[in-house]
Image (cartoon, rainbow, N blue to C red):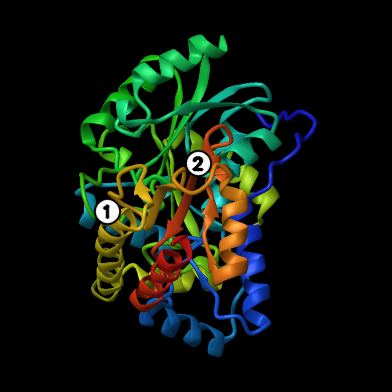
Amino acid sequence: MFSISKRSEVEPFHAMDVLAEATKRRASGHPVISMAVGQPSHPAPRAALEAAQAALVEGKIGYTDALGTTRLKHALAWHYRDRHGLEIDPARIAITTGSSAGFNLAFLSLFDAGDAVAIARPGYPAYRNILGALGLRVIEVPVTADTHFTLTPESLEAAQTANNVRLKGVLLASPANPTGTVTGRQGLTALADYCAANSIAFISDEIYHGLTFAGEETSALELTDEAIVINSFSKYYCMTGWRIGWMVLPERLVRPIERVAQSLYISPPELSQIAATAALGATAELDVYKASYAANREFLLKRLPQIGLSIASPMDGAFYAYVDVTRFTNDSMAFAKRMLAEINVAATPGLDFDPLEGNRSMRMSYAGSEVEIVEAVERIAAWLK
């Protein structure tokens, strides 16, 4: 498809701005604790580091096939067999330069300029920005307690009527950023069936799989072969800087995705693919890390309401608390700036995730160490008094 309109203006991604300012303050000697970005504090698994070190000693790092190495694709097929009981043809798997490349490839291959694609509000800001930059029409569908904080066929129908459009695509994350919502099997099935019945492309962002603490973690691949699934080694596998992810595609989309990938990326980085292949066998180590997030989650669920920051949506998965700050401010951006400047704690203003109502919310990542999270919250508690 590939036809895109003149590039639209991309909205700022304030989480990255906050991170940059936090990094600057830390370099100047300030005792900054960052709860702004979803980056695990743990290193990549030992097996991944050892595999990468061995590859560097050998020194034969180069291009791979555009959709990745056979070894990593077969390892991921085994992962789906082991974790979900699914038989996935490795030929349907595309290795990508992080999940971000997966979104670019999916949007370019599925849609034409002007097509309407639905996302949740609040939701990950890069969805909105990438879709807008490609000339696509972004339909932000509010997710509230009434919709169990997820997209539903009814909310999609209402959004189409309100915006006088017919959707060409739906993008859902479960667990979700920033809300932490886990869309269970029943809700995911309803969405998949609705999209199939209405010829709507269904894109399932499963980057936070492995980090579910409540509810039912289901892959869209368990329900349909037509879903486009996007995942990454960044979160559960603690490999953000390695920039390595993957897609699972309907067979008909493999060649179109490959053609675009060849032109945009040549291939994913081979060193990261080697490390990622090894990381897939490190579940025991990674589940220890997950337990530390679970402890942070339990602490925040109890402590944040005690200091006046009520939880705005379920903390079922991922590693975020999305909190209501209206007791203290109606400007979450100014609130975040003051908090960083005055007590050296960084968090993300809700405007990143919800352009309409995010002035009343903030996202706090609990991917850091338990000591850091407790210290950050106690600083906030004293500051709010």
Q: Nearer the viewer, residue 157 or 361?
A: 361
Q: Residue at x 76, y 37 (%)?
A: 9
Asked if 194 appears above or below 102 in the picture, the reply is above
Residue located farthest toward the bottom when viewing the structure as drawn:
57
Q: Nearer the viewer, mark 2 or mark 1?
A: 2
Task: Where is residue 176? Give x, y as percent.
Answer: 39, 45
Amino acid type of the residue tagged 1 in the rendering: Thr
Dot 2 or dot 1, earlier in sequence: 1
Query: Where in the figure is residue 11, as x and y percent of width and height?
Result: 69, 42
Measured as percent of width and height from the top left, residue 88 is found at 31, 47
Q: Which mark is residue 231?
A: none
Residue 212 got which mark? 1
Q: Name the residue tied to disc 2.
A: 360
Residue lying at 28% horizontally and 24% vertically, measured from the top left: 190
Confirm whether residue 7 shows in the render: yes
Question: Marks 2/1: CA distance?
Answer: 26 Å
**Do labels 2 and 1 touch, CB within 8 Å?**
no
